[in-house]
Image: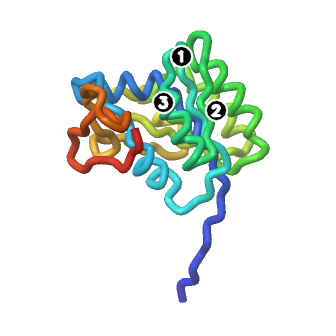
């Protein structure tokens, strides 16, 4: 007799925005390609509870619309980084280790291997979500689970001329996302 087991995990998602953006751009061959968080986040959570979402991004050109959307839908935060996101993301992951069951790191960068090992030693389940073709093999091997980010998880945004009502841009994708731009 099989009983239903309810998995009740608290999950934090920490995204190295520059790494994921570069990977998606490389695979799509288009710098206007963007991750569709509306489909990706539920897929990553797979019914588990979202505790925190942080999107780390190097530089000053951070989309205020992305920040607003992540905050509105997921109570997420966009964190600007002076240089690489590696150190701020690692510090935040270490701070969250005692507060969550699972940390999903959205990056394929091998610089996170030591962080993965540390978090696992602290008893945290660590999952990696990244574009498989640009993810370090050692990172996939050390993680508890690997979520491939595929073309189904992104869309192409084509900026257009300013239109009446302040809306601009067109979508070119298999399925246009439900974004307010």
Do callouts 2 and 1 mark residues in contact (Cβ within 8 Å)? no
Q: Does residue 62 lie above or below 84 as drawn?
A: below
Per the image, label 2 sits on a secondary structure element best described as helix
Locate residue 152 relative to residue 3 in the image: left or right. left
Residue 50 in the image, given as x and y percentages of width and height: 62, 52
Q: Nearer the viewer, mark 3 or mark 1?
A: 1
Res 27 seen here: no
Q: CA distance from mark 3 to mark 2?
A: 15 Å
Q: Which residue is mark 1?
A: 58
Q: Which residue is mark 3?
A: 107
**For this rendering, which residue is in front, 17 or 46?**
17
Residue 87 in the image, given as x and y percentages of width and height: 65, 18
Q: Which residue is mark 2?
A: 117
| Among the two numbered marks 2 and 1 on one chain, the one whose residue lies closer to the N terminus | 1
Residue in the picture at 27% in, 41% down: 151
Residue in the picture at 37% in, 40% down: 149
| Among the two numbered marks 3 and 2 on one chain, the one whose residue lies closer to the N terminus | 3
Per the image, label 1 sits on a secondary structure element best described as strand
């Amino acid at each position: 007799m099989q009983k239903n087991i309810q998995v009740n995990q608290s999950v934090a998602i920490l995204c190295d925005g520059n790494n994921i953006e570069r990977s998606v751009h490389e695979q799509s061959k288009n710098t206007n390609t963007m991750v569709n968080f509306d489909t990706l986040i539920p897929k990553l959570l797979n019914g588990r509870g979202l505790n925190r979402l942080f999107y780390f991004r190097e530089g000053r050109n951070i989309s205020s619309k992305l920040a607003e959307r992540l905050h509105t839908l997921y109570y997420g935060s966009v964190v600007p980084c002076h240089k690489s996101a590696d150190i701020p993301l690692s510090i935040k992951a270490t701070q969250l280790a005692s507060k969550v069951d699972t940390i999903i790191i959205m990056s394929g960068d091998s610089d996170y291997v030591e962080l993965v090992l540390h978090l696992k030693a602290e008893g945290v389940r660590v999952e990696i979500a990244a574009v498989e073709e640009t993810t370090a093999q050692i990172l996939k091997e050390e993680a508890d689970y690997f979520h491939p980010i595929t073309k189904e998880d992104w869309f192409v945004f084509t900026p257009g001329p300013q239109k009446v009502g302040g809306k601009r841009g067109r979508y070119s994708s298999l399925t246009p996302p439900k974004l307010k731009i």
